[in-house]
Image: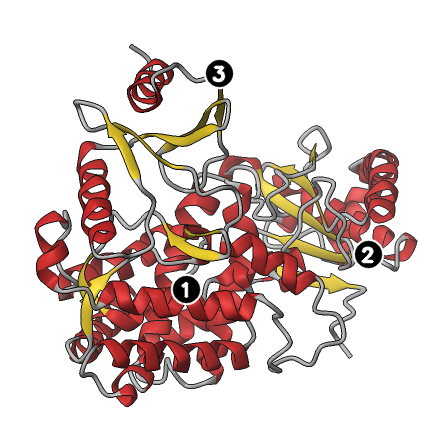
Amino acid sequence: MNSVKILSELFRKKYGRLPEDINRLAGAGSGRIYYRLRSGEDSCIGVEGENERDCRAFVCLTKAFRGVGIGVPELYEVSEDGLYYIQEDLGDKSLFSLIKEETKTCGERKEGSEEYYGGVRDLVKEALHELARMQCTPTEVWEDFVEYRPFSHRQILWDLNYFKYEYLKPAGIDFDEERLEDDFEKMADRLLSISNKAEGFMYRDFQSRNVMVKDGKCRFIDYQGGRQGPAVYDAISFLWQARAGFTKEFRNDMLESYARSYCGFSNVDIKEIIEGSGPFVLFRTLQVLGAYGLRGLVERKAHFIESIPAALANLKDLIDDGELADYPELTGVARKLVEDPRFAKDKDKTGDGEKNESPLTIEVWSFSYKKGYPENFTGNGGGFMFDCRGMHNPGRYPEYKTLTGMDRPVIEFLKEKGETDIFSDRALELIRPTVERYIKRGFSNLQIGFGCTGGQHRSVYCAERVSQKLAEEFPEAKIVVCHREQGKTKTYNDRNKK
C-alpha cells in the first residue's frame, strides 16, 4: 500500500470518509513528506515519516506537550508501523513567512525602534515566551519520549566536525586540521561549562519556519529531535537564523525578553543566560554552515546555497565582536570564509525570475578539465562553458611551461598561432544577449567558464580577454575573473570599492 492510500485510510478513520483532495506540500531540508488532505470543511496534514525513531518521538512528545497545554498540533491518527500520521492543519502561515513580509514593508521605520518589525515583534516575543515555557516543562513530562542523548562533549564535536567536513572541505578552504581540532576541543569545554547553568527541554531545531501562526497564536512543529540541553541554544537558533535577517538591536532585545520569560519559569538568574549567549551563537553559526554545506554545496539545493551569505554575515559579526579570539585556527578559517568572493552578500538572489536590486555579477572562470567544472554556489545552476582545448597549446613548448595566459610571451603566441581572439569573440557573441537580458530583468548572477587541459594558458587568456570586454561593454555589471588553477581572482566595476 502506497503512502497516499495509508494516509487516506487514516483520514477515513478520523472523519468517516475518504479525502476528496490530497496535495503534496513543498518540502524543506528533512526527508519527511507532507500532504494536505481535505474533504468538505475537514482538513488535516498527513505525514510520511523518514524513520520510525523520529516518528515515535514526534508522536509521543506531541501527546506529552499537549497534555500540559503547550501549543503543538493535535495528533489525530497514527499508522500501525508508526511511520505515517495525520495531525491538525495549522495553515500555511509560518512565522518566517510573516517576518519576510513585514521586513519588506519596514520602509522608513527606524531600525531598532519598537515599530521596526511591526506586528511581528509581538509574535516573536510570544514564540520565545512559549519556548521558555516548553523548555521549563518538568522533565518527567517528556524525558521518557526523547530519542536522542543529552547535549554532551561528544555531540558538540560531532556538530563541529560536521561543519568541517560538510562546509570547509566542499568549499575548498585550507586549514590545519590538528590545530582546528584543538580549537574545537576548547570550544566544547567552554559550552559545557555554560550549559549546565540553565538546562531543560532543548528543542534543537527551533527556528521561525517551525513556528506556525494560526488564529494569531504561535504553534510549534518539528521538535522530534529534542533532548536535555542548554536552554539558550534554542533562542539563539531562532534569533540568529540567517534568512530571518533580524537586526542586531532586535536580536539583543528579544534575547533579553526570552531570558526574562525563562527566569520567570525557573530559578535561573537572567545574567547566566545573557552572558552565556555569545559562545552559543558561534557554535550555532558553525552548525548552520555545516547544514548549508551539505544541502547546498554538496546536494546543490538552491534554498540552502542562497542562505550562505547571510550565515557568513553572522560569522563576520562574531569575528568583529571578538567571539573567536580564543580559537586561533578557527579565526583564520573564519576570515577566509567571510572573504570568499563566491558568497558575496549580493548573491542572495538567483537568476530564477525574481527581481533583485543588486547589480548583475558575472563570474568568468578559467579551469582545467582534468579537475572538473568550476563550482557554482549561486543557486542558479551555472551558465556558459567553453572548451579551449581545440586551439594550439603553448603548454607543449618548454619556454612557456612556467608561464600563464596573463604573461606577454604566451599572449603573443596565442594571438599569432592559437586562434584565441576569434574563439573568444564568438563566445562573446553568444554571451552578450544573455547579459543584456539578465540586466534588464534584474537577475544577479551569471557564470562563464573557459576550460583547457591544464587551466594555465588558453583558458586563462580567454577568461582575461572576455572579462575585460564585458567590463567595458557592461559597466553596470560587476565582473569577477577567477583563475581557479592559478589561485588568482580580480574584479572589475566593483561598486563596493572606493
**Mark 3, residues whose alpha carbon is within 10 Å: few (<14), some, or many (≥20)?**
few
Question: For residue 477, which numbered disc appears in the image?
Answer: 2
In three-dimensional space, the C-alpha distance between marks 2 and 3, rounded to whole angstroms, equals 51 Å
Who's the residue at 64% across and 77% down the image?
115
Q: Is any part of residue 219 visible from this angle?
A: yes
- Amino acid, disc 1: Ala
Who's the residue at 78% across and 43% down the image?
414
- Amino acid, disc 3: Glu
Of tags 3 and 1, the one toward the viewer is: 3
Of tags 1 and 2, the one toward the viewer is: 1
Please say if 434 is above or below 243: above
Q: x, y percentage for residue 294?
A: 39, 46
- The residue under label 1 is 127
In the figure, residue 396 lies in which quadrant? Answer: top right
Q: Is any part of residue 486 visible from this angle?
A: no
In three-dimensional space, the C-alpha distance between marks 3 and 1, rounded to whole angstroms, equals 34 Å
In the figure, residue 189 lies in which quadrant? Answer: bottom left
- The residue under label 3 is 20
The quadrant the N terminus occupies is top left
Please say if 171 is above or below 201: above
- Of callouts 3 and 1, the N-terminal one: 3
Say if mark 1 contacts mark 2, CB within 8 Å: no
The residue lying toward the viewer, choosing from 8 and 204, is: 8
In three-dimensional space, the C-alpha distance between marks 1 and 2, rounded to whole angstroms, equals 42 Å
**Mark 2, residues whose alpha carbon is within 10 Å: few (<14), some, or many (≥20)?**
many
Question: For residue 97, which numbered disc appears in the image?
Answer: none
Q: x, y percentage for residue 163?
A: 34, 57
| Mark 2 element type | loop
| Mark 1 element type | helix
Who's the residue at 71% across and 43% down the image?
351
